[in-house]
Image (cartoon, rainbow, N blue to C red):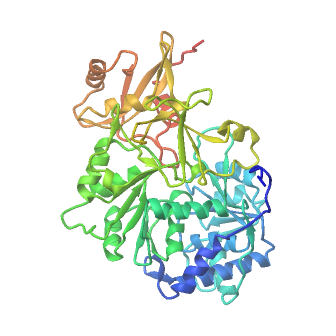
Amino acid sequence: MVTDARTPLTPKGASNLSILLRQTAARLRKETAVVRGNVTWTWSDVDARVDALAAALEGSGIGRGDVIMLHAPNSRDYVTVMFAAWRVGAIITPTNCKLTSEELVALADVVRPALLVLAERAVDHARALARLRTWTISDSDVAGGGSDVGRLIDEHLGAHVHDVEVMAGDPAWYFFTSGSSGRPKAAVLTHDHLAFIINNHIADLMPGLSNDDATLVLAPLSHGAGIHVLTHVARGAGIVLLPGESLDVAEAWSLIAQHRVSTMFTVPTILNRLVSAVTEDTDHSSLRQVIYAGAPITRQDQRRAYDVLGPVIEQYYGLAEVTGAITVLPPAMHEVVPTYEGIVTAGYPRTGMTISIKDAEGRSVPTGERGEICVVGPAVFAGYLDNDVANAKAFRDGWFRTGDLGVVDEHGLLYITGRASDMYISGGSNIDPREVEEKILAHPHVRAVGVVGAPDAEWGEVGYAVVVVDPGLTEGDLLAWCRERMARYKAPKLVHVVEQLPTTAYGKVTTPVLRELLQEAGLWPEVRVR
């Protein structure tokens, strides 16, 4: 008998993510799990703290399907909160700790948390969200005091809480995207979805990851670094936290040597700072994978990182909605990185994922032609929470539309050429800012650049370039250099030199922050384009 593959089958259970910690703690009880400053916890310690906090949650009526919003910088008990939430069947919602109180209110309105776990010092945020039940969190070790999380754990140590059973498709993490405008969007990541991501990260990024490894956490656990840490919990690899809230690169290199750190997740800005701080005395011999993602990297910075650190740097490409699992560029491909029109490849598809480049009508384009990067596979999220409009825009014929533009070559390598939303039209021609940026970066004295389309009475839109340059290179000289090497319609009309490119709270250089900088400098044109 032939069965219609679309016929609904019996719902199946899924592994609660909490089991990752439970299994590791049973297998590696006394091995190092979390290190921050002079405090070290074993896997048994962490599991006991999760049980204790889970008992406190249950005692407060927090359980299956409830949302716990976590707004704090990295701390020792950050992972405790995450796993305690899953242990009782709740949904964790970590947020960027740099967000303002007003921005956090907007996120809370989307996910409607039953509990807010808030940094002890976030007084303004507490006031703005006074309507919510709130527990504080910090690394404070004051006897009989400290944060609510620490106190509640102390009060419930010795409790044992069974992992709540979950089903395939049950939400585990509401992951806010880093979009810069409009209604905040919470990507729904499920227990089974994240289990695939963890396996995929280990297989494609960190093959052989084990309890002999350790990672140094350099970025907020609210986003990509948090996913990276889950892989280490699964395999019992140690997690080393920076002792402070900001990155001290000298201190980071000292911790890498001290704890024999082998894997790290970074973004290009952090990678550049680490590379710049390397000296003859820097010991980076333990590093096996230095993974960077989250923003484009220039060819110069990529090559410099490879030359300084060796064949350990590794890139992945992916959005929050695909939890970083679209492509990988492994260390072996970094010595001579293939390029397309000056843009370095983002690598090949991740295991189990399929990429298609599609035109505006949703049709696949031939190899070598530019279009929107669309993906299917188990890494794709379940959709945006309570946002039918956004879901309708994000999916077409089952494919997730990334909003990124790109090309796939005959070898299956992907090249990301820009964001569809960032393109501008000058004199009737579509211009991809990323392409212009790459051409400007070819100037030997340009260190960083961001290009944005600005309204223009004659051409409709023109490019404005915000640049970081070496001393001596003037705006006029760079404009002349561009006009000699680019088609007239692609060359920027204006160059504005700054000491550092502006970024969002997520560390990204985006069109809105570039536009805002130019407006504040009085350079944005007051032109109405029909």
Q: Provide residue 127's location: percent of width, then percent of height.
A: 70, 58
Q: Residue pushed farthest front?
A: 1
Q: Provide residue 17's location: percent of width, then percent of height.
A: 64, 70
Query: Which quarter of the figure is the N terminus placed in?
Result: bottom right
Residue at image position (21%, 62%) is 279
User: Does the rendering let one see residue 93?
Assistant: no
Q: Provide residue 258's location: percent of width, then percent of height.
A: 33, 76
Please state which of residues 351 and 505 is positioned toward the viewer in this rendering: 351
Please state which of residues 51 and 408 is positioned toward the viewer in this rendering: 408
State the image quarter where residue 196 is shown. bottom right
Query: Which quarter of the figure is the C terminus placed in?
Result: top right
Residue at image position (34%, 42%) is 298
| Drawn side of residue 383 relative to residue 42, left or right | right
Q: Provide residue 341's location: percent of width, then percent of height.
A: 35, 31
* Relative vertical location of residue 286 with respect to residue 411 in this rendering, above or below: below
User: Does the rendering let one see residue 285?
Assistant: yes
State the image quarter where residue 521 is shown. top left
Question: Number of callouts in the render?
Answer: 0
Q: Residue pushed farthest top?
A: 458
* Relative vertical location of residue 202 with respect to residue 468 in this rendering, above or below: below
Q: Residue pushed farthest left?
A: 280
Residue at image position (33%, 54%) is 273
| Drawn side of residue 243 relative to residue 126, left or right | left
Please state which of residues 43 and 81 is positioned toward the viewer in this rendering: 43
| Drawn side of residue 313 relative to residue 320, left or right | left
